[in-house]
Image (cartoon, helix red, strand yellow):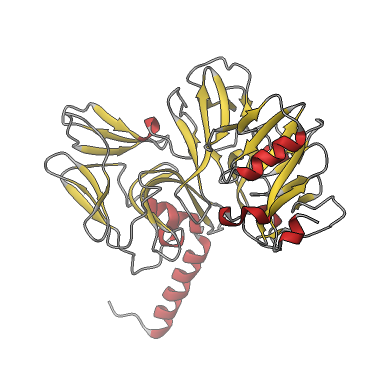
């Protein structure tokens, strides 16, 4: 049948109207349906960008498996250089709004992102290997004596690996990274480990774990610094479900819990503006070890650099970034062990100190002897004097005001001998 020009134009107009009426979420759902929730081996998947625009590409996700609101595959930065083999949680908005948001909740290779042309392969020998573009294996799950025949993504976001007898030989829920999803437990021996930043997936110093029947948030320093410890929790394997995670009350609408690069533990839900987090730890902002970065002083009004309270009023520190004061401070003249004769102390106001005293030098010593001992010790970056006890700090984290009579002295480098000994 041959249509005349008027009939053809009318057909095109009707088609366009139908496309405009159908909500964009329909097309997102159609794309989601194109992916399975499980695959059998042997098989392989190459990390290559799509030549066609898709909602997945707009979110930096190249799925292998999809189930419910979870996708498993390559999750890449928008520049496409740093890619993780990951499980992402996503939500597509309804009512004709085409916004699409995906957030990594588990990754196999946070410290070793891969590039374009990386390969995930499930071999005929039953091995699952993530290889970079140069064919280097960057991740392979440990399954001693067991071969892998199937990858399966559950509706809860758990990536499960099965052998040929349908036995689970490995699952991502047993190897959390920085997040927990609903239905997931955090058992003793496991921990959440924060990323360095939203742009850097490598592991940072912040961790959250169940230790001796308590929730503990800490920073992996030398020694480790605990900045939150709960009372005893009811279960040794607390589960995130039904608006509860151990002793924490979580909004019913929260989709995942994440330990952030700033040490904050937050429950996230998707709002119109994107993923929005609510703090779970009941501590004040200055209680986080690096709330204001290294050498930063945490105040109610914000972050600042240490001031000299002596009559010299010298300036020894400046913000690393004046527009972002919580990044910390840097010394104008860096400490040099070869120039120890040019070193002195910047004295902070009474009560300012670091949360954790890292090394007790002496518990019976005079103030001046404490300061002199720190000056003679190259690794001592600052000293805190508290009721006759002298503590050395090998690194200076954020400092906060306490109700104590602590005296803290930060070692500084002077430019001349006269600056050190007036």
Question: What residue is shown at x 66% (from left), y 58% (from top)?
Answer: 331
* Residue 5 occupies quadrant: bottom left
Question: What residue is shown at x 38% (from left), y 35% (from top)?
Answer: 158
Residue 168 higher or lower than 67, as above or below: above
The percent position of residue 342, horizontal first and vertical second, equals 67, 56
The percent position of residue 396, horizontal first and vertical second, equals 64, 45
Camera sees residue 142: yes
Q: Is residue 212 left or right of residue 353?
A: left
Question: What residue is shown at x 37% (from left), y 83% (from top)?
Answer: 4
Q: Residue furthest right?
A: 311
Most foreground residue, 270 or 77? 77
Exactly how many numbered labels are in the figure?
0
Q: Is residue 116 left or right of residue 20?
A: left
On-image quarter of the N terminus: bottom left
Residue 354 higher or lower than 412, as above or below: above
Residue 345 higher or lower than 47, as above or below: above
Most foreground residue, 84 or 419? 419
Question: What residue is shown at x 44% (from left), y 60% (from top)?
Answer: 77
Residue 315 higher or lower than 94, as above or below: below
The percent position of residue 387, horizontal first and vertical second, equals 77, 26
């Amino acid at each position: 049948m041959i249509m005349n020009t008027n009939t053809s134009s009318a057909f095109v107009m009707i088609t366009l109207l139908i496309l405009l009426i159908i909500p964009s979420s329909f097309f997102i759902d159609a794309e989601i349906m194109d992916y399975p929730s499980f695959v059998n081996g042997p098989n392989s998947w190459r990390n290559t960008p799509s030549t066609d625009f898709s909602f997945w590409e707009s979110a930096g996700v190249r799925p292998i498996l999809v189930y419910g609101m979870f996708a498993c595959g390559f999750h890449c930065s928008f520049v496409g250089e740093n890619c993780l083999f990951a499980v992402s949680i996503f939500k597509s908005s309804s009512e004709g709004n085409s916004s699409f948001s995906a957030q990594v909740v588990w990754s196999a290779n946070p410290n070793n992102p891969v590039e374009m042309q990386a390969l995930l392969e499930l071999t005929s020998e039953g091995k699952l290997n993530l290889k970079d573009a140069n064919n280097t294996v960057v991740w392979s799950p440990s399954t001693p004596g067991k071969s892998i025949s199937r990858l399966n993504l559950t509706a809860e976001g758990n990536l499960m690996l099965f052998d040929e007898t349908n036995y689970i030989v490995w699952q991502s829920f047993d190897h959390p990274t920085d997040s927990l999803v609903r239905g997931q437990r955090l058992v003793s021996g496991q921990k959440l480990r924060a990323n360095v930043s939203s742009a850097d997936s490598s592991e940072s110093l912040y961790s959250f774990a169940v230790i001796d029947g308590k929730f503990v948030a800490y920073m992996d320093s030398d020694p480790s610094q605990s900045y939150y410890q709960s009372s005893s929790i009811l279960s040794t394997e607390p589960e995130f479900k039904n608006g509860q995670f151990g002793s924490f009350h979580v909004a019913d609408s929260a989709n995942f819990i994440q330990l952030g690069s700033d040490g904050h533990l937050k429950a996230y839900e998707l709002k119109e503006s994107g993923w929005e987090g609510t703090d779970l730890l009941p501590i004040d902002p200055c209680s986080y070890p690096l709330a204001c970065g290294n050498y930063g002083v945490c105040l109610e009004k914000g972050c600042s650099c240490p001031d000299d309270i002596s009559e010299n009023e010298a300036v020894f520190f400046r913000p690393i970034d004046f527009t972002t004061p919580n990044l910390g401070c840097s010394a104008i003249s860096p400490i040099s062990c070869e120039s120890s004769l040019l070193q002195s102390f910047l004295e902070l106001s009474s009560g300012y100190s670091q949360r954790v005293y890292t090394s007790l030098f002496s518990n019976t010593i005079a103030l001046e002897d404490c300061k002199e001992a720190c000056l003679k010790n190259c690794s001592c970056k600052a000293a805190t004097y508290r009721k006759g006890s002298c503590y050395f700090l090998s690194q200076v984290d954020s400092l906060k005001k306490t109700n104590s009579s602590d005296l803290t002295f930060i070692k500084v480098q002077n430019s001349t001998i006269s600056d050190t000994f007036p």
